[in-house]
Image (spheres, rainbow, N blue to C red):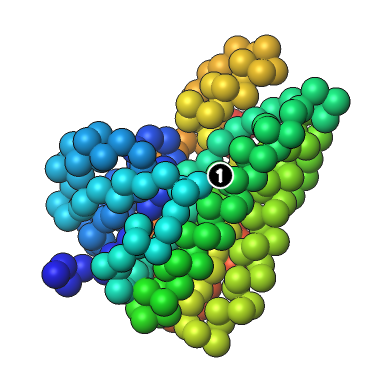
């Protein structure tokens, strides 16, 4: 059994999730969340202490988290982007986005709360600037992020007495595959150097993780500076 604090990161195989895994690797035993068990096994071999957490987040059962008796950090980084006009979005698109971005987060958190309480751990949700404002074409994505913010706000109050801290990280546009998808939707050229780099979001997670017990990073926004 590892003596390192344990961090479970969903969406750990790419983008922000991978950057967070790299940031926490020197100080934590990592549970790398994703769907492809073999790919996660290969990824785990790159870190000092890590193992796969292969799961379909929309189909979680208690058996999936069996054996996790103590969890110091739960990072929700997995998510999907679905843009479109309200007039064009289908019920299936609404359902799928909420299943991944909200319902799976709530369910995994619920299943792991006993382990988080045992460790006096923390939940860190990678939200978005879209969790504060919506606009043309973003009703669905923003809707899930508004809901995620409501979830973390409530969870923070509910678990304060149990010693579990809850942080909500709100990046603006980040240079990831999802950003490429967004630019394709908008019909704009994608220049990754203009946007927040994933490692900067990971540093915000590190700030929340390293906060002493007398404090909690409740909400943190990160935006492109516009200077590049």
In the rendered structure, the answer to whether residue 150 lies left or right of residue 48 reads right
In the rendered structure, the answer to whether residue 28 lies left or right of residue 228 reads left
Q: Quadrant of residue 111?
A: bottom left
In the rendered structure, the answer to whether residue 69 lies left or right of residue 87 reads left
Depicted 35 relative to depicted 120: above or below: above
Q: What element carries label 1?
A: helix
Depicted 137 relative to depicted 53: above or below: above
- Farthest bottom residue? 161
Quadrant assignment for the N terminus: bottom left
In the rendered structure, the answer to whether residue 152 lies left or right of residue 77 reads right
Mark 1 surroundings within 10 Å by alpha-carbon count, few (fewer than 14), some (14 through 19), many (20 or more) = some
Q: Position of residue 21 (x, y in %)?
A: 32, 48
Q: Which residue is drawn at 44% across and 54% down?
A: 60
Q: Where is residue 91 in the image (x, y as percent from the top left)?
A: 74, 34
Quadrant assignment for the C terminus: top right
| Number of numbered markers | 1
**Looking at the image, which is closer to me, 202 or 5?**
5
Q: Position of residue 119 (x, y in %)?
A: 35, 78
Q: Can you identify the residue that label 1 sits on?
A: 100
Depicted 124 relative to depicted 86: above or below: below
Q: In which quarter of the image is residue 133?
A: top right
Q: Which residue is drawn at 69% across and 28% down?
A: 83
Using the rendered image of the protein, determine whether residue 227 is visible from the camera's viewpoint: yes
């Amino acid at each position: 059994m590892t003596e390192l604090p344990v961090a479970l990161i969903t969406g750990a195989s790419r983008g922000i999730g991978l950057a967070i895994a790299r940031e926490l690797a020197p100080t934590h035993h990592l549970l790398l969340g994703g769907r492809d068990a073999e790919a996660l096994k290969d990824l785990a071999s790159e870190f000092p202490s890590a193992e796969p957490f292969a799961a379909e987040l929309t189909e979680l059962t208690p058996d999936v988290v069996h054996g996790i008796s103590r969890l110091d950090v739960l990072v929700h980084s997995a998510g999907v982007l679905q843009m479109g006009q309200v007039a064009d979005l289908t019920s299936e698109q609404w359902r799928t986005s909420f299943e991944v971005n909200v319902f799976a987060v709530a369910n995994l958190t619920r299943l792991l709360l006993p382990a988080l309480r045992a460790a006096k751990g923390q939940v860190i949700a990678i939200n978005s600037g879209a969790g504060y404002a919506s606009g043309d074409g973003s009703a669905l994505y923003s809707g899930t992020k508004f809901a995620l913010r409501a979830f973390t706000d409530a969870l923070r109050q509910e678990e304060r007495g149990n010693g579990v801290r809850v942080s909500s990280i709100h990046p603006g546009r980040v240079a990831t595959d999802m950003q490429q998808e967004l630019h394709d939707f908008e019909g704009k050229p994608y220049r990754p150097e203009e946007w927040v780099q994933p490692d900067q979001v990971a540093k915000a997670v590190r700030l929340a993780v390293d906060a002493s017990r007398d404090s909690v990073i409740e909400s943190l926004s990160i935006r492109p500076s516009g200077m590049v």
